[in-house]
Amino acid sequence: MHALVVVSHPDSQSLTHAVARSFAEGVAASGEHTTEIADIAAEGFQPAFNQADRAAYFLQEPLPSDILREQERIDRADALVLVYPVYWWSFPGQLKGWIDRVFSNGWAYDEAPDGTLGKRLGRLAVHLIGIGGADGGTYARRGYDKAMRTQIDHGIFDFCGARVVTSEFLLDVNGQAGASHIVTARALGGHAFAGAASGGVDLPEVAELPS
């Protein structure tokens, strides 16, 4: 099976990129699966939803060529993995724009004139890994984790029919937890496709997230 790992961070030496690479190494360690890492910052993906995107949304014009390329990458994958830093309790702007443009009407879902919705990504397993500086207590106390899962897991992926297998926040990266997140990411990658079958991933004790 094949996983597309989309990473959104401008610094290739960042923890975000290290986590993405570690996840991919975990997938590859089984010897049975493959990965592609899509570094959308290095690739210069343009996130702004534009007039061509709007015309494609209304099915008046074909999709722009850069969007077709992204959709083809996802179509080749059995799993989509998003690895990103948490900015203002959400995706970075570039990754949100990637979703805005790539998850288009007629590909990710069908929206009929009468408002009927068809979900088109039911075959796709999704793994979400957010990396944040605050600790887990802050996320739980303020409800940030629940809010993000509502808007992302449900609001984006359930809307399109995709199954969210992994939804993790690797937190407190400015404290003592940073190094352990590399171990966690590798464990998540190693169980990526097994987790898709069972509906979840059991992390080893060494990789538990901070409370």
Image (cartoon, grey):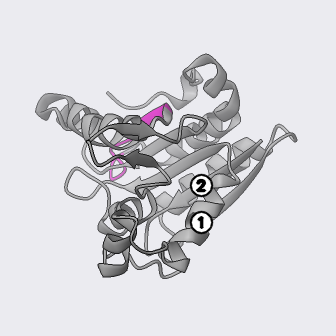
Amino acid tagged 2? Val
Q: Report the Cα–Cα distance between label 2 and label 1.
A: 6 Å
Residue 142: x, y in percent? 12, 34
Q: Is residue 169 magenta?
A: yes
The residue located at (43%, 68%) in the rendering is 9
Q: In which image quadrant can residue 79 be found? A: top right
Pick whichever of labels 2 and 1 is earlier in the sequence.
Answer: 2
**Badge 2 local density, few (<14 within 10 Å), some, or many (20+)?**
many
Q: Is residue 36 visible?
A: yes
The residue located at (51%, 41%) in the rendering is 120
Q: Nearer the viewer, residue 209 or 103?
A: 103
The residue located at (57%, 20%) in the rendering is 202
Report the number of numbered marks.
Answer: 2
Vertical position of residue 206 compared to residue 162: above or below: above
Vertical position of residue 148 compared to residue 91: above or below: above
Q: Quadrant of the N terminus?
A: top right
Q: In which image quadrant can residue 101 be found? A: bottom left
Which disc is residue 55 wearing?
Answer: none
Kind of element beneath mark 2 = strand
User: Tags 2 and 1 in contact by the CB under 8 Å rule?
Assistant: yes
The residue located at (46%, 42%) in the rendering is 128
Q: Nearer the viewer, residue 208 or 199?
A: 199
Residue 103: x, y in percent? 43, 56
Amino acid tagged 1? Ala
Which residue is most to the left?
A: 142
Residue at label 2?
Answer: 5
In the image, 68: left or right of 136? Answer: right
Q: Is residue 201 magenta?
A: no
Residue at label 1?
Answer: 38
Highlighted range, magenta: 164-175
Q: Quadrant of the C terminus?
A: top left
In the image, 103: left or right of 89? Answer: right
